[in-house]
Amino acid sequence: MSPKYDDVRNSLLGWLSTGLREEPSTAAIFHQLCHRLVDYGFCLSRSTLHLRVHHPQWLGTRIIWVRDQPHADEQTVAYDVEATDVFQRSPFHRVIHTGKQVRQRILIFGPHIFQIYEELREQGHTDYSAWPLDHSQGRRHLITFATDRSEGFYDDEIALISDILPLFSLVTEIRLKNQLARTLLQTYVGPHASEQILDGATTRGSGVTVSAAVMMCDLRNFTQMAARRPRDEVIAILNDYFDLIAEPIERHGGEILKFIGDGLLSVFPLDRPDACDRLMAAVTEAYDALARRSPLDHQIRFGTGVHVGEVMYGNIGSTRRLDFTVIGPAVNLASRLEGMTKTLQRPVLISGDFVKAANCASRTEYLGNHGIPGFDDLMEVHALRIDAELHAR
């Protein structure tokens, strides 16, 4: 390697080693790397970074950097992409499965072995190389570089990229694992709880008391359904039901804390002054969506209990196994109200305290004062006014 490229390599290695402590984003680091290579004289015209992120909705992300564009383009990659013919007949497949670099001079006149080379030729690129990015525990990702210089990449440039990629791989692994931890926590405990845990709320008993609107939902006739239908059909019905209620909850700022078999527990903290209105909007939208379902769809019926009050929000559990959730009388009352939807034949039952807090009496039907198991005093109970055909059974 020439002295010029030796200096460039040392500069890049130093930047990767000590210059990125405050940069949490893999995409930003990749973007900076491409610009630094250009600043050092590389005729880099295009680069891509392919990462497996194991998000519940997609397998990975693809970041595409193109010279003279102000920002890199970040795209999601579907879980089924690796089964497609396009992936199977690509340099990506070869690199991922062999762990070896692929290099291809782009010919003016084909044919090329992979379709992507034809696409790169049409875009004006002349040389292409793809490398594996190996992380720990056998996880492999991918990075590619292309140039539009007529003579392609210089040998020193290829050697330099090969020299810096092990450290770049380590830098990206640290960020990717941080992102994976955050994604997994958000997926399994929700966005607010995940931030609490990442900030250090990991000891048993740690938590705070907050005022919140609480809702508890439960699918009707699930035991009979599970006994009579195939397993995969039962799972599909559960997922369909949870989509009906979970999507409007999240859209209106609620936090789903727990899926309990066929039940769901959610809170809308009252630090937002319109929290009760948001909960009502979420419940209404869920039942409206249920009413619009085709009669040919499998029948879903669910009951909902709604209350407002103080809850303890934090860690409970055994010494080694914790659950970040909410507990307290307000949660218990919401659960009891949900249970009463079966006997009172109303799909949504709301406490008098919530009706006062949300000022929503015009949207409810007063059902009188009722004894609630576990509570000494009679409780004022209301039913949300919705289509009678949607009453819980």
Image (cartoon, rainbow, N blue to C red):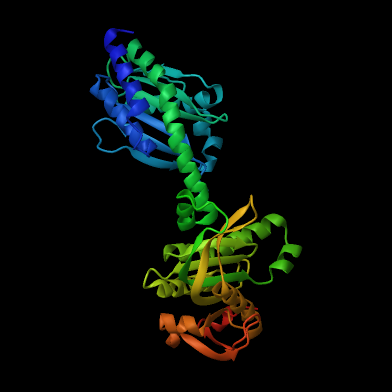
Q: In this rendered view, identify the residue nearer to me: 269 or 286.
A: 269
At x 40%, y 41%, the residue is: 75
Work out whether residue 114 can be spotted: yes
- Residue 341 position, x and y percent, is 61, 80
**Percent x, y of residue 278:** 42, 71
User: Along the line of sight, which residue is nearer the eye, 327 or 184?
Assistant: 327
Q: Quadrant of the N terminus?
A: top left
Q: Residue at x 55, y 61 (%)?
A: 325
Please provide percent x and percent y for residue 277. 41, 75
Residue for point 65% across, 80% down:
374
User: Relative to the observer, which residue lies in front, 348 or 320?
Assistant: 320
Judge by depth and name the residue closer to the eye, 159 or 184: 184
Farthest right residue in view: 227
Q: In which image quadrant can residue 160 be found?
A: top left
Would you place residue 373 above or below residue 43 in this image? Answer: below
**Considering only vertical position in the picture, is 8 above or below 193?**
above
In the rendered image of this protein, does residue 73 appear above or below residue 129? below
Quick check: can you spot residue 123?
Answer: no
